Image (cartoon, rainbow, N blue to C red):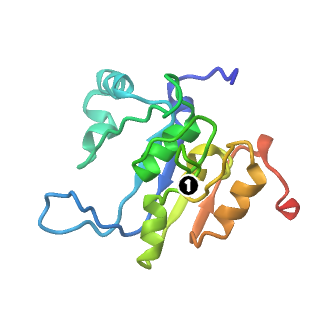
Amino acid sequence: TGEVSCFPMTVRFLLALAAALTLTSCTHATSPKNIILIIGDGMGPAHFTAARLLRGDESRFSTMPIAGMVTTHSADSIVTDSGAAATAMATGLKANNRTVGITPAGNASESVLEAAEKTGRSTGLVTTAPFWDATPGAFAAHVGSRYEANKIMRQMLQSGIELIVGGDARRSRPLQKL
């Protein structure tokens, strides 16, 4: 994308699912009341190791009680993009590059956020990117191209999510054009 930044600025946090979800694979006696999913866009195990080596015990990553990893490679390319990666994180299913929230066959795939909405839980998406970007979009939209910003915006705003916050005013679009 041509961006040049240092480590703290490259970490774009997506805070998703700021309300109660049930962990079906959780081994704890009780389910957590709330879940916050933090996605450091483009981050991998090496970044966590670097943070731990740089900050030691001050690294906030090491204080999180539960952490997980997911493979996010796309279904149609050896190099993935954020639409396919976020769809894998949001739905547990692989997707083709440039798509958001759909399977390689073109079917909508339910995200964990949508599953939470169905059970009446409150949900939210907070991102430093525009809220219609491919990463947050994969949690609440289903489009054939990550570049269909108006469709992604419309679907996200109609999804039932209680809170949507986005950033990056340089790429903002007037909502009246939806």
Image quadrant containing the C terminus: bottom right
Q: Position of residue 75 (x, y in %)?
A: 48, 34
- Name the residue that disc number 1 marks: 107
Residue nearest the observer in this picture, 159 or 36: 159
Q: Quadrant of residue 23?
A: bottom left
Q: Is residue 84 left or right of residue 37?
A: right
What count of labels does the image hold? 1
Q: Quadrant of residue 126?
A: bottom right
Circle 1 residues within 10 Å: few <14, some 14–19, many ≥20: few
**Residue ID at (56%, 50%):** 102
Q: Is residue 5 left or right of residue 103?
A: right
**Is the residue 141 above or below the residue 62 in the image?**
below
Q: Is residue 43 left or right of residue 150?
A: left
Q: In the structure shown, which secondary structural element does the residue marked by tag 1 occupy?
A: loop
Q: Position of residue 4 (x, y in %)?
A: 65, 20
Residue nearest the observer in this picture, 112 or 93: 93
